Image (cartoon, coloured by chain):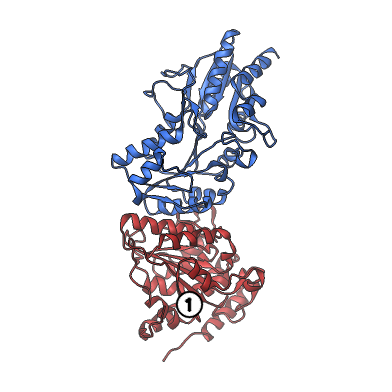
Chain colours: A blue, B red
């Protein structure tokens, strides 16, 4: 049985904004003397922590206007001048608008740019033009990229700080900015590429990424009432995937349910299913996420409920699977 | 900007000789690898590239990662064989090494499009058109952050300017007033399927560049070394910090320049050379060799 990590979880709905928390972290890092550049594309409010960081350090910050492809290219050029670059990009216009720049300028040139894509999945609201449903599928197929989906705001700040020590390019995928904290105590071990088993269980493993980690945790809590013991894994790094953790979960529980605010095609679920299938481990894999259609129109919480991505939906799916 | 006519003719003569040799080496390289090179655009670029590497760029071939060097981004990355040939002439490689390590799988260093991972002299891996200008803007901003006195040159093709991403980058360069950026348009007038002016025209290019915030230097004949030198002599010292209009050099060239049977022939955008064509090309390069008194 995998041992749960030494973490203190937060079961209350305490909402935080990854943008706000990582912005404060950037300020701290700059105050500590760390050298890096920052770019945005007309997507940072002056009143936000990132905005305050930009105001305090204007010589290293550039607002390139509404031009995401150019933002990614300029970020690569800045990195080629010998510095780490963070670029906050409005998620809906990052992966597909700037796909060629991500592929050729960031990944192929293998430069230390951290693209922080906001409004992951359907968190933006406003319909499919503003949904980010295919980014993980794209990123996963591009060599050299490290892909992170922090589980909560504070973990995003950890990722931003830890990224300073890594040489290659990185995607940090975050939600809109009012998501529940998963971890109540920030004093836990976070390593890029190493998943975190946050609850132990023997009947099923729920692997979540990004905001879906909290939904998975809540689903496990609900299943507990039915006597179903669910292990929950925070898969904050999509690439490189923590293959060992997936295989261990497959062997130990024989059933994996993945949850992500992304198309079920090509994201976390696809990555997990590939690992399980290629290793020949007998294990049922069920992917929960957005189906192969442009999402229905509604507030994010309504959309999640509609597609069974919320805790109730996840729990119901698992109950059904266990009855089969 | 007005042209300085006080160009040093000894320098021009030396560079013309070098351009003649590079053209010979380039067609020989393409013949020896037995694969299609983008000879049309590679030949149109030779005179400018020679002038930059042998005279006008701050550059040490013995130390291609010298911190104070000028940076050159070849946005029209498909013309990298011109640079490879120059690197060999500068003593960084032998011609045999270039040929043996061209797209040779696990021993490869060189490819149709340049990769900075394998070639220290290459500042950025390019090949997909419309990327170099954004990279160059980023490099120029990086020099501004470091208050470093090196310059960024970015060479783009005229057909390439049909890519919208170029104009996002040019707009940013004008906005940031990058006094350390020089954009060079190798305006040979042709693209893969025909004349640029008949495909989707980029003209009036000088007016467009000025409207995007650039100072423009136009070279009437970009395959005339004297005119190339006159233009490059006009460049002011790079200014990393203070805002100054970036510079665009529009170099009117001939696609295939120096090899008569390729000049202004659309089909020589890309092509292979058999032995007969290679010998014909060498003969033509020799016939077109400039001898300045």
Q: Quadrant of the C terminus of chain B?
A: bottom left
At 43% from the left and 89% from the top, the residue drawn is B292
Q: Is residue A294 above or below residue B262?
A: above
Q: Give x and y (percent) for residue B116.
A: 45, 56
- Residue A275 vs residue A76, the one in the foreground: A76
Q: Secondary structure at mark 1?
A: strand
Is residue A163 something that shows in the picture? no
**In the shown orientation, is residue A253 left or right of residue A186?**
right
Q: Give x and y (percent) for residue B71.
A: 39, 62
Q: Give x and y (percent) for residue B138.
A: 43, 56
Farthest residue toward the bottom?
B293
- Residue B44 vs residue A289, the one in the foreground: A289
Q: Chain of mark 1?
A: B
Is residue A308 something that shows in the picture? yes
At 48% from the left and 18% from the top, the residue drawn is A12
Q: Is residue A137 above or below residue B40?
A: above
**In the shown orientation, is residue B166 left or right of residue B267?**
left
- Residue B166 vs residue B13, the one in the foreground: B166
The residue that label 1 is drawn on is B218
- Residue A178 vs residue B98, the one in the foreground: A178
Q: Is residue B154 above or below residue A120?
A: below
**Can you tell which quarter of the image residue A23 is in?**
top left
Across the whole image, how many numbered discs are drawn on residues?
1
Q: Quadrant of the N terminus of chain B?
A: bottom left
Label 1: how many Cα within 10 Å (few below 14, some 14–19, many 20+) = many
Q: Is residue A225 above or below residue B221?
A: above
Q: Give x and y (percent) for residue B48.
A: 46, 74
**Can you tell which quarter of the image residue B4 is in?**
bottom left
At 43% from the left and 54% from the top, the residue drawn is A77
């Amino acid at each position: 049985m995998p041992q749960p990590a030494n973490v203190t979880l937060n079961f209350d709905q305490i909402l935080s904004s990854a943008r706000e928390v990582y912005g404060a972290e950037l300020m701290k890092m700059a105050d500590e003397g760390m050298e890096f550049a920052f770019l945005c594309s007309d997507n940072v409010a002056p009143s936000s922590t990132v905005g305050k960081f930009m105001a305090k350090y204007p010589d290293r910050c550039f607002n390139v206007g509404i031009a995401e492809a150019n933002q990614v290219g300029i970020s690569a050029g800045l990195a080629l001048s010998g510095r780490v670059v963070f670029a906050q990009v409005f998620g809906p216009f990052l992966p597909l608008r700037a796909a060629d720049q991500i592929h050729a300028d960031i990944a192929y040139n293998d430069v230390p740019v951290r693209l922080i894509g906001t409004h992951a999945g359907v968190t933006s609201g406003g319909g499919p033009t503003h949904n980010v449903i295919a980014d993980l599928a794209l990123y996963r197929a591009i060599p050299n990229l490290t892909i992170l989906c922090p589980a909560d705001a504070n973990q995003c700040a950890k990722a931003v700080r830890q990224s300073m020590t890594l040489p290659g390019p990185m995607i940090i995928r975050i939600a809109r900015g009012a998501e529940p904290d998963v971890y109540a105590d920030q004093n836990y071990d976070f390593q890029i590429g190493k998943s975190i088993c946050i609850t132990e269980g023997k009947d099923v493993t729920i692997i979540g990424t990004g905001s879906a980690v909290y939904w998975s945790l809540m689903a496990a809590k609900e299943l507990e009432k039915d006597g179903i013991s669910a292990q929950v894994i925070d898969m904050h790094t999509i690439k490189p995937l923590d293959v060992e953790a997936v295989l261990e979960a497959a062997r130990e529980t024989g059933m994996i349910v993945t949850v992500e605010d992304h198309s079920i095609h090509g994201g976390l679920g696809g990555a997990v299913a590939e690992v399980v299938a290629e290793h020949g481990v007998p294990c049922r894999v069920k992917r929960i996420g957005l189906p192969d259609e442009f999402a229905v129109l509604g507030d994010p919480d309504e959309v999640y409920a509609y597609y069974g991505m919320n805790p109730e939906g996840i729990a119901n799916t698992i109950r059904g699977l266990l009855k089969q | 900007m007005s042209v300085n006519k006080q160009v040093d003719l000894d320098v021009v003569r030396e560079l013309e000789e070098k351009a003649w040799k590079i053209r010979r080496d380039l067609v020989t390289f393409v013949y020896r690898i037995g694969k299609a090179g983008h000879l049309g655009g590679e030949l149109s670029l030779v005179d400018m590239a020679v002038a930059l590497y042998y005279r006008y760029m701050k550059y040490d071939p013995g130390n291609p990662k010298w911190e104070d060097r000028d940076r050159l981004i070849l946005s029209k990355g498909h013309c990298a064989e011109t640079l490879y040939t120059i690197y060999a002439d500068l003593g960084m490689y032998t011609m045999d090494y270039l040929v043996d390590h061209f797209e040779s799988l696990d021993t490869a260093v060189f490819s149709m499009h340049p990769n900075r991972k394998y070639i220290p002299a290459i500042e950025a891996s390019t090949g997909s058109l419309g990327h170099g200008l954004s990279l160059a803007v980023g490099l120029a901003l990086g020099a501004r952050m470091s208050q470093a006195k090196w310059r960024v040159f970015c060479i783009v093709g005229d057909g390439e300017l049909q890519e919208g991403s170029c104009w996002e980058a040019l707009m940013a360069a004008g906005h940031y007033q990058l006094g350390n950026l020089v954009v060079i348009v190798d305006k040979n007038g042709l693209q893969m399927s025909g004349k640029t002016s008949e495909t989707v025209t980029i003209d009036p290019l000088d007016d467009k560049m000025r409207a995007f915030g650039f100072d423009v230097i136009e070279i009437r004949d970009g395959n005339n070394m004297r005119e190339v030198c006159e233009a490059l002599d006009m460049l002011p010292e790079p200014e990393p910090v203070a805002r100054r209009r970036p510079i665009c050099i529009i170099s009117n060239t001939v696609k295939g320049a120096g090899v008569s049977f390729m000049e202004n022939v659309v089909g020589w955008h890309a092509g292979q050379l058999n032995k007969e064509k290679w010998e014909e090309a060498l003969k033509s390069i020799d016939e077109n060799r400039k001898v300045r008194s």
